[in-house]
Amino acid sequence: MLNIRKWEVAPLNKERAAKLSEEYDLPSSLGILLDIRGIHTREAIEGLFQGEALADPYQMRDMDKAVARIRRAVEDFEKIAVYGDYDADGVTATAMLFSYLQAMGADVLYYIPQREGEGYGMNRGAVEALHQQGVNLIVTVDNGISSIEEVALAGELGMDVVVTDHHRPHERLPQAAAVVDAHRADDESPFRELSGAGVVLKLLIALEDGDAGQVVSEYGDLAALGTIGDVVPVLGENRAIVQAGLRLLEKGGRLGLDALLAQCGKQTGLTATSLAFSVIPCINATGRMGAPERAVRLLTCEEEDTAQSMAAEIAEDNQRRRQIERAISGEVMAAVEADPRLRYARVIVVSGKGWHHGVVGIVAARVTERYGKPCFVISVDSGEARGSGRSVEGFSLFEAVSHCAELLTRFGGHPMAAGASMAPENVDAFREKINEYAKEACPFMPAQTLRLDCKLRPGILSPALPRSLAPLAPFGSGNPQPLFGLYGMELREVLPVGGGEHLRLLFSREEMTVRCMRFRVKPEEFPYAPGDMLDLAVALEAREYRGEEQLSIVIKDMKPAGLETADCIKSLRLYERLRCGEPLLQEEKASLAPDRKKLAALYRHLGGRKGRPAGPLALLRALGEPESGLGKLLVSLDMLEERGLIIRQEKGEALHIALAPAKEKVDIFASPLYQRLAGPEL
C-alpha cells in the first residue's frame, strides 16, 4: 500500500539570506538556512550562537509553594516519595529529584508504576501503598496534573502532594500543596514546552536559590535525555538544556550512563539524534519490558561493577523488545494487508490477542509510517482490550478517541498520539465509530508532509556543507535536521549492502556522480531501476572514515522526477473511499474508471517488464499518465487481478507483477470492482 508524502520546499528570501551571511560573517549555506528557519532578528541569531539562558524558575506558578513544602519535608525528616513514570522522561526526572534529595540528607524513596497493571500516572493502589510505608509527601514528576481523585485520596490519608508535570491540565487542577505546570492557564512562564525532566531541573534550580550553573552541571545530562526522549521542541530553554547535556555526556562521569553509552557504542560524537536511537530506547525498554525502576537504579548507581552489569542487562532488554516488536509488527502488517476493511479505512484499527502492551505504540507508529494514515493497535488480554495509536499532522487522534468515549473505560493523549482501554467486545464498535468520526471531521485524510529546507545542485555537495550548519544543532522536534532536495537525478546503480537489508544507490546529474544510502529497504522492496529519473529528499552528515572526512547522504524519500504528489494523494484517497464502499459522485467514479484502451496499454507494459518490480508511481510515469490518474491505475491493477490476468505481490514499496498463464478469453469489465463503478451512484 502506498504512503505518498506531500513535498513542500520552504520559501527563501535570497537577499535577506545574503545580508545575514555578510552581517554576521557566516557561510552562505548557514545564512540561507537561518532565513528559511525564520531566524532573522539579532536577538534570535545571538541566542542561537550564544545559547539561551534558563528563565527564573519562580516565574512558574506555585514554584514557591513547591520549594517551601519540599524544604520543610527535608528539614523535618519527613518521608518523601518521588512518584515518576516509566518512560525516559519520567525515569530521568525521577533520578534527578531522588538523587538531589538524597544528597540533601532527605528520607526519600521513589516509585515508578508498572506499565502492565498500573499504567501511566498515579493510581489508588500506589497511593495506599505509599501511605502504608509512612510517606508524608509525594512529589510527582512527569505526571499528576490529571490525577484529581488520586491526589484527593492522598490528602484523605494525611499525605501532601506536590505536582510537577508538563502535560496539559483538565479544567480542574488537583487539590495539591503545589501544582507546577507551565501549561496552567494562570502560568506566566516565558517558555512552556519543557519536558518533565526540564520542569524538575527548574525545580532544583529554585531549591538551590537560582544557582542554575551548579544545577545544570550536576543534572544537565539527565535533563537532556528526558528532553530528547519526550520529543518536546528542541527550541528555547529546551535547546539550552540539550546543548549543556550533550557536553556533559561527552565528558562522562555518571557511572550508569557511561556504562549504557558503552553498551550502545555511543561514547563520542554524541548528538540528540544518536541518543534518540541508542540510549533512550534502552531506557524506555525497562518500562516496556516490565521493570522500569531498574533504569532509575542504573542512573543513580555509584558502583562501577554494578553499573556495568545493569547496563548490559538493560541493553539485552532492548534487544528483546526489538524482537517482540518485529514479531508483532509482522502480524499487524499481515492482518492489514489481508483485510481491505482495515487497509483502506481512514483510521487503521487492528487488534490481536496477547500482543505485548509495551510495544503496541511503537508498532502503531510503524503502521502509520508505512500507510500514511492514523493507526490504533489494540491488544486483547485477560478480559481487557488496551491500545495505543499514532496520527498524522492535521488529524487529532485525541479528539477522535474522545468521540468514542462511551465505548471506553479509559483514554488519554494528544493530537498525534493517544491510548485507550475498552471491553474486548467493543473493539469492532470502536473501529467503526472512530472511522465515522474521521469521515465527518476529515473527508480526505491529510497526507504526511515532507518539508525540504531547499533544493541543491550536486556540485555543491561536500562535507563542508553539513559542517557549516552545525550551529543549528542540536536537532530534534521543532528544529529538525536539515532536509534537502536533489532533483532530476538519474539512477545508475543499485547495490545491496548490510546483508541485503539496505541499499547503496549511485546517481548522476550534470556530469556529477552521487552515492546515497537507502536504509531498511531490501532490493526486492525497491520500486525503481537504473535509468529512472528521480527526485530525492536527503539528509547530509560529515563523517570521518579512516582518517578522512567524508559526506554521508541518506535518502529519506524519493519519487519520479517532476512528479507533483498533491494530485496523487487526492486520487489515492478517492480510490480508498471506493475500496471502503463509501458513496461516490458520478464524476468521482468516472475519474477512477479505466477504458479498454488504458487497460490494454497497462497490460502490454506489464508484459514488457517481464516481472521486474515497480511502484505505482513509477508505473504512472512509465505509462505517461497524469498524477490525477493514480486512482485509475490502482483500479486497473485490481481489475486485472480480479479477472485472473495478472499475479500481483506487494513487497515494501514495490509491486511484483507477472502475467497469468494464457487461458480462454476473459471479459475484464466483468470485474466486480468495475461493476461498482459502472452502476448508479454508490
Image (spheres, grey):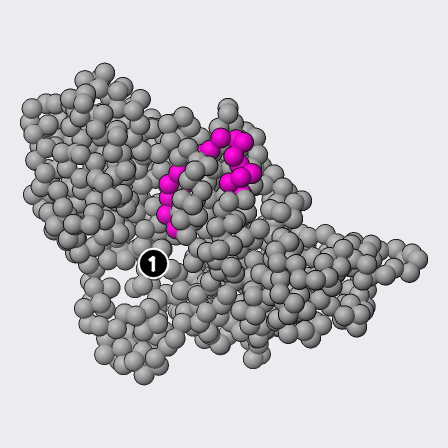
- Crowd rating for badge 1 (residues with CA inside 10 Å; few <14, some 14–19, many 20+): few
Residue 575, position as x, y percentages in the image: 63, 60
Q: Front-most of 620 and 482?
A: 620
In terms of image quadrants, where is residue 315? Answer: top left
Q: Assign a secondary structure to mark 1.
A: loop
* Residue 229 visible at all: yes
**Residue occupied by mark 1:** 478
> Horizontal and vertical percent for residue 255?
29, 34
Q: In this orientation, which residue lies closer to the viewer: 399 or 320?
A: 399
Magenta region: 411-431
Residue at screen point 33% across, 68% down? 37
Q: Residue at x 18, y 42 (%)?
A: 180
| Percent of width and height locating residue 148 | 25, 34
Residue at left offset 73%, top offset 68%: 594
**Which kind of residue does numbered mark 1 sit on?**
Gly
**Please, which residue is most extreme toward the bottom here?**
15
151 relative to 535, above or below: above
